[in-house]
Image (tube, rainbow, N blue to C red):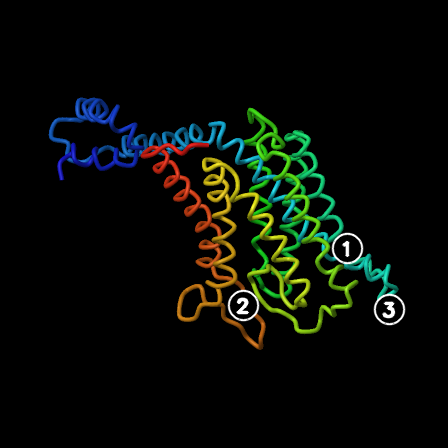
Amino acid sequence: MTLQQVYRWLLACYPRAYRRQYEDELIGVLLDDAAPGQRKPLARDVSALLGGACRAHIRQVGTRFSVDAWRDAAQVFGLIAALLLFVRSARVPVLHLSMYAQSYPDGIGEPFVLWPHGLGAALWLVVAVFTVFAWGGAAAAIAVGGVAFEVVRVAEAYGYYSTVFDIWPVVLAAMIPLALALALRAPRPVTAVLTRWRLGTLAAATLVSVGAPSVALVSAADVSTWPIYGTWIFTSGVGRVEAILLIAGYLLFALVVLSTPTALRLRLLALVVPVGVTLLLTRVGLRTTGTFLQRTSHDDVLDALTWAQWSTLVLAPVVLFAVAVAILHRLERSGPQQA
């Protein structure tokens, strides 16, 4: 392989648009600086080229995400994600309040059971409300606290049981402050992006999902009778009434996303990719037998994840999100979507 071929191979790491504009010029400069008879590039040249490729890709990503369509999608995603995490945390306190109102023997429940769920629900509800009122900076700052809360919850479960079954809320939570920070310079508030009927649908979805266990309780449908075990409702062991209401709530959330204009909808679906990948890995992949994702156990206690499994959990959502964004960019370049 000649020196020029090696340089072209290194320049292949740069974005295509950058190569079209600068490749021949860069190769000419590099060959002019090379010593007579030189067969291999110098280490400093390799380092400079690879570093330049990384910077070029970062600038390209920044340029893509700086467009108004991504900022609109980011604030809509931040609102919906905050509401979903609010639903997940608020269902337990609301259920115990219903039990208290119905004079159940267990009353309102033990404080150590209620306060973590109540704290999480309060944090994510504030984030959602601040997002609606276009207080993006404050919402992003509070969301950072919400991320820490979700990390602690998952870390405690992993410390006791080595389980990562519910690690998806951490991924979803971690994306919220990033999305809200990106949306700080959005051209219009989230209320204008979604319109009134979609905001009303989000409110209805939240109320239906949060109130699902309470409605099942008040309707005298015992949540322990005919339990449904399924990862598709993000919980397990719930009664049929509660499962139906949860599904209805999720469908309303999905309706809001799928009813948005094409450019916004495609970006929202791309933003969901990391959470979807995490769900598949933790609820399907880590149960697969005969692969490096297989979980081992001793005396019915799961062993800790290996470094390869942790690497997969961390890198796979990031890589597939990047792939989704690249596919979206290519689709829009080949045929611009009409908003």
- The location of residue 188, given as percent across then percent down, is 58, 26
- In the rendered view, would you say 4 is above or below 169? above
Position of 27 with respect to 88 (left or right) is left
Residue at coordinates 48% horizontally, 59% vertically from top-left? 281
Of the numbered discs in the image, which one, if any, rests on residue 143? none
**Alpha-carbon distance for marks 1 and 2?**
35 Å
Say left or right for 144 vs 54.
right
Question: What element does badge 1 sit on?
Answer: helix
Res. 246 image quadrant? bottom right
Q: Position of residue 219 (x, y in %)?
A: 77, 64
Residue 303, label in figure: 2
Label 1–label 2 contact, CB within 8 A = no
Q: Residue at x 45, y 53 (%)?
A: 311
Residue type pointed to by label 3: Pro
Residue at the far left in the pictured view: 37
Q: Which residue is mark 3?
A: 105
